[in-house]
Structure formats: C-alpha cells, structure tokens
Image: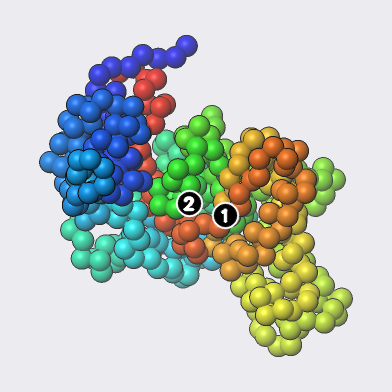
Amino acid sequence: MPGGTNLPRIRDYNQGVVLEAIRIGDGISRVKIAEDTGLTAQTVSNIVRRLLEEGLVVEAGVDPSGRKPRVKLRINPETRYAVGVLMDRDGISLALLALDGSVVASSSQPLTVPAHETGAIIDMVARCIGEMIENSQIPEHKILGVGVGWPGPMDHERGIVYEPLDLFGQNWKELNLKKALEDRTGLRVLVDNDATAAAIGEHWVGGAQNATNYAYIFMGAGIGAGIFLQDQIYRGDTTNAGEFGHITINFEGPPCFCGNRGCLETYCSPVAMVTKVKALLEENKPSLLSKGRGKIDFEAVSKAALEGDALALSVVKESARILAAGIVSLVNLLDIRLVILGGNKLHPLRHIYQSEVDKALNERLITRNVKPVTVELSMAGEFAGAVGAAALVLHEIYTPRLAGLGQSS
C-alpha cells in the first residue's frame, strides 16, 4: 500500500524540482521554471526566494528575449561542496565537486598498505580527504559530506560493506565503512555501489542530465551497471542492483570468485583480459608485451592495444564484443535508449568499447528498428567513479525523489 505524505515533504520535493531546473537550465527564468515544472508562478517565486536567501542560487543578468526581460537564475557553485572517493583494486581516486557539478580538484593515490589492513587503508582515505579539502582552501562548513564508491556488496542505508571477495579480503566483511570514515573525518559519509555512484554523477554533471531512463556501464575493479528508470536511481531491495558483471553467459564457464560459473566478468573484466594476454604469451604469440616491458598488468595491456599491438588489441576487442552482447540483453530487458560507458579502467579504451557496443546494438537489439540507442562516453573521464561518489552527497540532499513522498512521518 502506498504511504501518505505531508506538506513539508511536498515543499522539500518542489524545492528540489526547482533547484534541479535551475541547475540543468543554467540561466533559466522563473517563468520558464514554472512552464517546465508545472508549478504555479507563485510557488516558484516563493521557492526561488528561499534559495536566494540560502545562497544556493544567484540572479545572473537578464534574458532580453521575449516581450518582457526576465531575470536569469544560476546555481551558486561556491556555497556547497562534496568529496567523492572511489575505492579500487589498485588504489583510490578522489574528486571535489561544487554544487553546480564542476570538478574543483581530483587526484589518485595507489594503495600503500596491504589490502587486508582495513584500519590503515581507512586512515589513508581519511588523510587524502583531509588533504584535498585543505589544499582547496574551502572552509569545512561548506563541505556537505563524503561519498564512497564501493566495488562490491554493501548496505547503502547503513554504510556497511561486505567484502568484494577478490579484492580486499575477509577483513572487510561487514565493516561499517560509513562510521569508520565519519569518526576519522568528522564529515557525513554515504556509501554506494561504484556503478550506481557513476550513474548518479552522470545525471548530476554529465550527458544524462535530461535523461529519464539509462544505464551506465562502469568498468573499474569489476563490471557494474548503474540504472536510472523513470528519472530515479534504481537500487533494488538490498541496494545492490546492477551487478551486471555477474550475469551468467555460460553456465558451464570458468568459476567466478562470487561462487557462480561463467559470469560476464570472467570473460571481459580487466583481470580476465590480463589473464588471457598472459596465456597467449605463454604460447609464444608475438607481441610488444613479450619484449621485456616488465610487469604485465591492465595498464600495460591497454597501452599495447592503443599502440596497435595485434595480440593486446585482439584481446581488448574480444572483451568489448562480449561486453556489448551483455549490454544488448540489458537494453532488451529495460527498453532504454541511452547507454553510457565509463570507469577508470574503461576510459583509456573507451573508443574501442563505444564502437563495439554501438555496432552490437544496431545489429542485435530486438527494437533496433523502433528507435536507435545512443551510446555515449562518460563526461567525467577517468575520475567518473570519484565524481559520481561526490555527486552521491549532492543527490541525496538536493535531488527530488518520488520515493520520499511515499513515506509518512
């Protein structure tokens, strides 16, 4: 049964609607906000007055078009900020995001302690957060909080993580990452799936600002899908929706760390690609990678592929084709018309992946003749996960969410 609501929730929701219209419109008038949102002119005027008083928006000149000049409204980026952290197999990346979605600072840091040493890693993350805020010279009272993109099972509402089985080990199982970071930083902390965070980031600052339905395919430590449906992020019952890398594509395939067999990730994740390249090199297949280039990791494979190495390029393209086949199934299931590709591992190879996914959707999608699917690359680049994690905080506070209207208080 749907829950009731009350006037304060409606007011907060409408304020979120207006703020989002201003953020996306970037120079929009009160009249246009009323037209676009369906709110009355008086309601819009009242909300804008509150936003101006709080310093969240500013009046930015006059639009001379039309019969009557109209005052333009814009987000004031200097009033609120959020920090985002992406945790990955190789290290962490961070981003500092202003209220208007602009990236103020970004950085990455390799893990300098063993992955199983939870306290040391959390100390490192907290230290990096503090250094980013200090270096930005932004007063701490303007920092709304910290978002963390986590590469495995977690409880978004409580901030508890459940070990990504092949990454950090058993010491992370049922660890309250939210509390641990809040205790160390003194800031509010939100924890979410890395792909979900990236999808929220694209909705806040990227090419999906006006999209109602889309999937963000994120390749970082693994492969995930952040899903927006009916203009709302979809998290599922346990807040772990989007484990795209663990759909079965061969039930007799190789074992996956999750306990299943033949998962998509076992064929086309960064780890799978490195494993495949090493196997081919053991067969003495010719490659730039066999000529004393040192450690063979995903970065080396990516670089070789971009330099035209036939072996590395064949492995990358095969991975892209397998991923594309999975994306076709996802689009068939959800009936969406926008797919965004991103993630720190996918970024250097983004054009190869975009080409293969676009080709597969044009050739295999059951609704390909109804309306084409657009395949876009994340506008946040290699820091998409960290930018998305920061956007988690802004999204939680300012984005209008229909779910909130269905909860009585």
Q: Position of residue 202 (x, y in %)?
A: 46, 50
Amino acid type of disc 2? Gly
Q: Position of residue 214 (x, y in %)?
A: 56, 42
Coloring scheme used: rainbow
Q: How many labels sit on residues? A: 2
Q: Position of residue 16 (x, y in %)?
A: 30, 35
Badge 1: residue crowd in 10 Å (few <14, some 14–19, many ≥20)? some
Q: Position of residue 279 (x, y in %)?
A: 81, 70
> Which disc number belongs to residue 207?
2
Point 37% across, 26% down: residue = 404
Question: Mark 1 or mark 2, which has the lower sequence index?
Answer: 2
1 and 2 marks in contact (CB < 8 Å): yes
Residue at the top extreme, as displayed: 1
Pick the quarter of the image with the C terminus.
Answer: top left
The quadrant in which residue 125 appears is: bottom left
Amino acid type of disc 1? Glu
Point 53% across, 34% down: residue = 229
Residue 2 in view (yes/no): yes
Residue wearing tag 1: 376
Point 75% across, 38% down: residue = 366
- 255 over 286 or under it: above or below: above
- The residue nearer to you, when weighing 305 against 376, is 376
Helix, strand or loop under label 1 = strand
- 327 over 319 or under it: above or below: above
